[in-house]
């Protein structure tokens, strides 16, 4: 039997709130560079290896679009990138992907993959996909149930029912995250699997079931898709209509209600990395059960996850702790409370603290900048511009800037004058001057920027032209009328 093309759908709109302070709103866990690379990159490579896989569809939050695009470019993978204007959970995100696949004129099989999972070996997933293809091609909505290896209270479970084909079973019921006693019972019953959050189905079959069981999501996403527009390599959907969609998971909106749900068992090393406990499980551990990442010294410590990113972390005489250090925040938590990091983060965000959303290193489509020091009327930053990249043509109402090149070559435009600066050379950008920074070289450009002025917020950037289509750009007439000094 011939099946339609399998189009991977890579979901990367999550914020990873339980992994704060490493994961932040504007730099979530799927894009963080770990020792083995990013989780998003690993998912893209895994999806490319699926036999018969077509062009992937990536669904991500608009705030993360340049992370996704740059990593895809590094991997040499061409993808269709759909932007969610705001988070609405997995059911609306998958609906957009199904609408995009339908727009392409073929009723593809959609292989839905979250971008923050670890699966080994990949071949186990490929075998499960092959087993699911016939059922999915015939209209079933297939999910993949991971064979459990321990009584896990952080995952949902699936009870499989009667056989529906070779290696395929009807879903009898879904089980919410259990307590420990219930998890022990489910592990002892080989009819249960972990709910992996991965799926295979025809685009048309999903949309039909979504229309039947969650018409509010179906209608809102359809209108949002009809109002789409192209922005560089991205597809933006209508914000107002998408915002009107109920925020719901595919499990609640469709899978727990449809009669077309099937499950294919998947036996593999799998972890959704949804908590620090999950990170501890996949890390190398010493004889005392400690996972140590970065510059860590431990004495008489046991069963801890100790993570350093910027400085020495020393642990003495402690056990069952999570300690995660970043440049601007440190988390210390008992193992029994790690699922509550999300609530802790909500308190931090409610207090209006920037640590909830951003790191001191902030990534941009052209590179990144890191805040080194700040005080009354001054701020010092380290700016890295990738080869061939350029910042927006801009000016500031409230600050002046001093730039010192410490590595590479900079092309700097101030008013009508453009010039090249090499290492150890500097320039001054007066308040209100139109300016631009470019890296014409083949190595990263690194500069130290000293800002001075009455207000130093990032919202004091007026963009006159931007190569990346970011908001805030002014009409050309405004540029012509400005004093170039």
Image: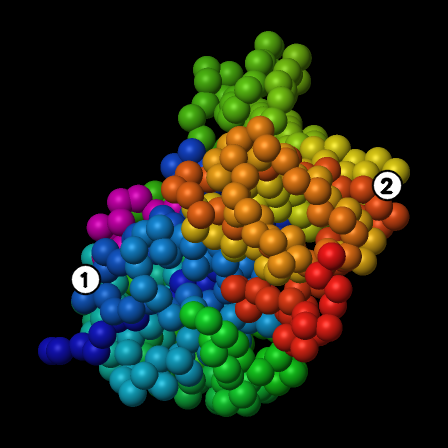
Q: Secondary structure at mark 1?
A: loop
Please state which of the two labelled residues, at mark 2 or mark 1, is closer to the viewer. 2
Say which residue appears at 52% left-offset and 64% top-offset. Answer: 467
Q: What span is in magenta?
A: 114-126
Pointers 2 and 1 in contact (C-beta within 8 Å):
no
Name the residue beneath numbered marker 1.
51
- Earlier along the polypeptide chain: callout 2 or callout 1? 1
Q: Check residue 13 for magenta coloring.
A: no
60 and 314: which is toward the camera: 60
Q: Which percent across, then down, holds residue 215?
A: 55, 88
Rendered view: 459 above or below 256: above
Say which residue appears at 19% left-offset and 66% top-offset. Answer: 52
Q: Check residue 121 for magenta coloring.
A: yes
Name the residue beneath numbered marker 2.
377
Q: Secondary structure at mark 2?
A: loop
Tag 2: Cα neighbours inside 10 Å, few (<14), some, or many (≥20)? few
Give residue 164's mark: none
Q: Which percent across, then down, holds residue 244?
A: 65, 82
């Amino acid at each position: 039997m011939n099946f339609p093309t399998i189009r991977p759908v890579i979901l990367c709109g999550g914020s990873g709130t339980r992994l704060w302070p490493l994961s932040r709103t504007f730099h979530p866990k799927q894009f963080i560079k770990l020792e083995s690379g990013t989780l998003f990159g690993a998912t893209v490579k895994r999806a490319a290896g699926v036999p018969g896989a077509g062009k992937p569809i990536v669904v991500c939050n608009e705030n993360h679009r340049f992370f996704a695009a740059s990593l895809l470019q590094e991997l040499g993978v061409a993808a269709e990138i759909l932007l969610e204007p705001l988070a609405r959970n997995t059911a609306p995100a998958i609906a957009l992907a199904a609408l995009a696949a339908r727009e392409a004129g073929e009723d593809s099989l959609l292989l839905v993959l979250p971008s923050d999972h670890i699966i080994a070996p990949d071949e186990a997933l490929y075998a499960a996909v092959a087993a699911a293809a016939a059922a999915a091609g015939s209209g079933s909505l297939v999910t993949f149930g991971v064979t459990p290896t321990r009584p896990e209270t952080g995952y949902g479970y699936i009870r499989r029912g009667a056989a529906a084909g070779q290696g395929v079973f009807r879903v009898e019921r879904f089980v919410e995250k259990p307590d420990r006693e219930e998890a022990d019972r489910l592990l002892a019953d080989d009819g249960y699997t972990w709910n992996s959050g991965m799926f295979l189905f025809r685009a048309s079959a999903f949309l039909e079931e979504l229309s039947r069981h969650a018409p509010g999501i179906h209608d809102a996403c359809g209108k949002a898709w009809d109002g789409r527009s192209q922005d560089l390599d991205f597809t933006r959907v209508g914000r107002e209509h998408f915002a009107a969609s109920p925020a719901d998971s595919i499990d609640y909106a469709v899978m727990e209600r449809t009669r077309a749900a099937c499950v294919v068992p998947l036996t593999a090393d799998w972890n959704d990395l949804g908590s620090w406990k999950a990170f501890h499980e996949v890390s190398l551990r010493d004889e005392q059960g400690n996972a140590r990442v970065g510059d860590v010294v431990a004495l008489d410590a046991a069963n801890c996850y100790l993570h350093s990113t910027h400085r020495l972390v020393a642990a003495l005489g402690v056990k069952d702790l999570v300690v995660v250090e970043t440049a601007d925040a440190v988390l210390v938590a008992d193992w029994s409370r790690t699922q509550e990091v999300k609530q802790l983060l909500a308190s931090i965000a409610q207090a209006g603290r920037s640590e909830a959303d951003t790191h001191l290193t902030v990534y941009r489509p052209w590179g990144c900048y890191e805040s080194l020091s700040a005080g009354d009327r001054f701020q010092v930053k380290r700016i890295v511009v990738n080869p061939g990249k350029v910042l927006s043509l801009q000016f500031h109402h409230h600050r002046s800037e001093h730039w010192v090149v410490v590595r590479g070559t900079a092309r700097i435009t101030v008013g009508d004058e453009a010039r090249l600066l090499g290492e150890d050379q500097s320039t001054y950008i007066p308040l209100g001057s139109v300016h631009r920074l470019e890296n014409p070289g083949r190595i990263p450009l690194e500069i130290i920027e000293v800002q001075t002025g009455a207000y130093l917020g990032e919202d004091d950037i007026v963009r006159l032209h931007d190569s990346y289509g970011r908001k805030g750009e002014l009409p050309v007439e405004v540029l012509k009328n400005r004093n170039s000094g």
